Amino acid sequence: MTERLLEEFLVQIEAITLVPSSGGVYEVTIDGDLVYSKKATGEHAEYEDVAAPVRERLG
């Protein structure tokens, strides 16, 4: 997922930070704002589930 996000948003993304957690928590934030949460959806994230809100946020 990280590699695909970097490929698609190469110009817009300066850095990606991975933070290990437990319990299957998978969250994506941009500048501190939550744009995707596996905990909230209760489903395994597919690429488009994450990429769509990132596209929306980055324009």
Image (cartoon, grey):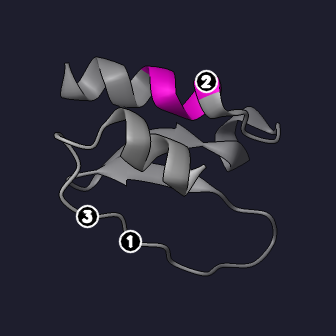
Q: Residues within 10 Å of mark 3 (few under 14, many from 20)?
A: few
**Residue picked out by circle 1:** 17
Q: Magenta part mainly helix, strand or loop?
A: helix
The Cα–Cα distance between marks 2 and 1, rounded to whole angstroms, is 19 Å
Q: Are marks 1 and 3 in contact (CB under 8 Å)?
A: yes
Q: Are marks 2 and 1 in contact (CB under 8 Å)?
A: no
- In the rendered structure, the answer to whether residue 51 lies left or right of residue 13 reads right
The Cα–Cα distance between marks 3 and 2, rounded to whole angstroms, is 20 Å
- In the rendered structure, the answer to whether residue 47 lies left or right of residue 5 reads right
Relative image position of residue 48 (x, y in whole percent): 61, 24
Q: Amino acid at mark 3?
A: Ala
Picture quarter containing residue 10? top left
Element at label 3: loop
The Cα–Cα distance between marks 1 and 3, rounded to whole angstroms, is 7 Å
Q: What segment carries the magenta color?
A: 48-52
Q: Residues within 10 Å of mark 1 (few under 14, many from 20)?
A: few
Residue 48 disc label: 2
Residue, x 17% and y 40% (percent of image)? Answer: 11
Relative image position of residue 22 (x, y in whole percent): 75, 78
**Residue picked out by circle 3:** 15
Q: In front here: 49 or 8?
A: 8
